Image (spheres, coloured by chain):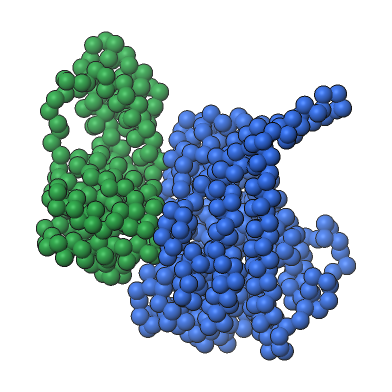
Chain colours: A green, B blue
Amino acid sequence: MPGKLVQLLSDLKESEALSYVQEALDKGTAPAVLLDEAKEGMAIVGERFSKGEYFIPDLIFSGEILKGIVALLEPKLKGEHGEEVKKLGKVIIATVEGDIHDIGKDLVVFMLDVNGFEVIDLGIDVPVQTIVDKLKETNAPVVGLSGFLTLAFDSMKRTVDAIAAAGLRDKVKIMIGGGQIDDQVKEYTGADAYGLDAMDAVKLAKQWIGG
Amino acid sequence: MEKKWEEMTAAEKQEAQFQKLLALKDPEGNDFKFQSAEAEAKYKANITRIKDAIQMKKKPDRVPVVIFPSMFPYLFAGITPYDAMYDYDKCVSAFKKFILEFDPDMHIGASAPGPGRFYELVDYKLYAWPGHGVAKEHCYQCIEKEYMTADEYDLLLMDPSFFFRNFYLPRVYGAMQGFTMLPPFTGILEMYGVAFNFIPFGLPPVQETFQKLFEAGAEALKWAGAMGGSDAELKSLGYPNILAGYSKAPFDVLGDTLRGTRGVMMDMYRIPDKLLKALDQQVPIMIAMGISTMQQTGNPLIFMPLHKGADGFLSDEQFRKFYWPTLKQVIEGLIEGGCIPFIALEGRWDSRLEIMQDIPEGKTFWLIDQSDIQKVRKTVGQKACLAGNVPSSLLKLGTIDEVKDYCKKLIDTVGKDGAFILSNGAFFDEAKPENVKAMVAFSKEYGVYK
């Protein structure tokens, strides 16, 4: 029954999806096949979110279901699924220095990941230098900076300035987002764009990286 | 006011509250002493202006202007949020400087920073605060976790006080660890065997918890004294604070600090019935919380910051099922009790406005952050006073002229028929002082109703 898991996951049927995976494994279905179906299901979740049919709780719940599926598959996947799926490109994500809010940032990380980007999540309260260092190390073409408080405006600006000072500004696109961020803040910080939600982050990354 | 309080309608209670504020008494029951006749006239004009805006019976003399800051007053006065939290005198004098220089029509007190030493004494784990997890120059920030697990709903539903005392609070306040050993007080019934219930009070961990709480209580009292003194002084200068306390939407009670955002979202799918029961359980608790602070302070305003019902955080169906019904009951219960819910729509709520317009007229006031305030006026704003929505970004990054333009547009549109208070939209730390001043001064001048 190819595609069954795609449907169960994208319709957020947690218990049905998990028992389907267990039964399929018992019957000898290759775990890699199930993993691919799960990924396809997650892509549909992302699509529905971007169309406004799904909301944040649906996204988070789909992530929970996926976690459960992966936990079932993982012991059987080892050694078998050697070759990594090709990712669209690297995106560095961080909540800026002084700010410890993570709900919005985590949603952006999740949506980028689901949409095939290789996300480097630096966490919260990330010092300017850490972001610059990571940028040098990975050559990521996109950086996303998150912040909820007014203090984040300055931390974002300092981060953008430091990226410029390191001579990397023309090699990277910078997007910002969070609580009070708008066009005026974008201008102030020197970022390339800002987004209102996690889907905006995906759109921007796709626009800049392709895919 | 011949009628007894219990016999009054909600409208009569609200009017009585305002009349009490207008005929102000000191704690001894004598007429309140203002510092000058001008201060007294200013105070009464401010109360009347706010009253007219909230009640929607007539236009005030002009658009009331209020500032709702977070740490701005302290940064403006040149002290850090750390200083404001640890030195109550500095906190109070910074706040006074802020009020006198910016001259808003009312304020909600100097209590935003809170008592730093108190948080240390109770070993508070729910927040990081200046010098304690965040820099001294920054504001405190919540550390969201699942402080209540999904399998603890039954315990919460059985006896919320027992759950809070023995499970939730000791997780969030390190000093309350000893309370995990206390028995349910509802088992203390008859003489035979009753002493067994009291054994925990003889044990060192419980006694240690009480010792720490005595100390923390003394610190809280010291801080509250400073806050009360600040309010009384500002009142004597003509600046009212009519805030009593706060209450919450039941869904936010569960979603903010008990289950957390992720937890409460999962519960909607996995255990919706238990979540709904817990939300129902919170309704009388949240109403009583607001009414008791009104009784203690004599002020009518109950602050209700709304969080997890914002656009995108729930589907329309989830909002109608999990968020709004119990919130509506809390709002109505507070109004019945004589309170004025001061509802802050934090973030953007454009998709919820039509559902939330089902409220009694002239009994609430709503602080609008990033929602489309024109749309709010046409929905919730048909029945309620609105405040807002000058953006934080404009106050920090804009020019004086841009601020004036924004205020002018607000007054010309949503403010043109009254029932509008001009203010910022979100609690803010940093801003250009000249922009905040322009917001107040321009709106006072331009906002006069003819």
Name the residue located 51 percent from the left edge and 67 percent from the top edge: B83
- Residue B185 lies, in percent from the top left, at 75, 34
Residue at screen point 34% across, 45% down: A106
- Report the side of B38 relative to B150 (left or right): right
Query: Within the image, what quadrant is residue B348 found in?
Result: bottom left
Q: Residue furthest bottom?
A: B37
Q: Is residue A136 above or below residue B17?
A: above
Q: Nearer the viewer, residue B401 or B149?
A: B149
Q: Camera-side residue: A145 or A135?
A: A135
**Residue A11, percent from left and from top:** 35, 31
The quadrant of the rendering that contains the N terminus of chain B is bottom right
Left of A82 or right of it: where is A123?
Answer: right
Taking B403 as reference, is A129 left or right? Answer: left
**x and y percent of residue B356 in the render?**
54, 55
Residue A46 x, y percent position in the rendering:
29, 41
Does the rendering let one see residue B250? Answer: yes
Residue shown at 13% from the left, 36% from the top? A86
Q: Residue furthest front?
A: B204
Image quadrant containing the C terminus of chain B: bottom right
Establish if A118 lies above or below B338.
above
Q: Residue at x 30, y 53 (%)?
A: A126
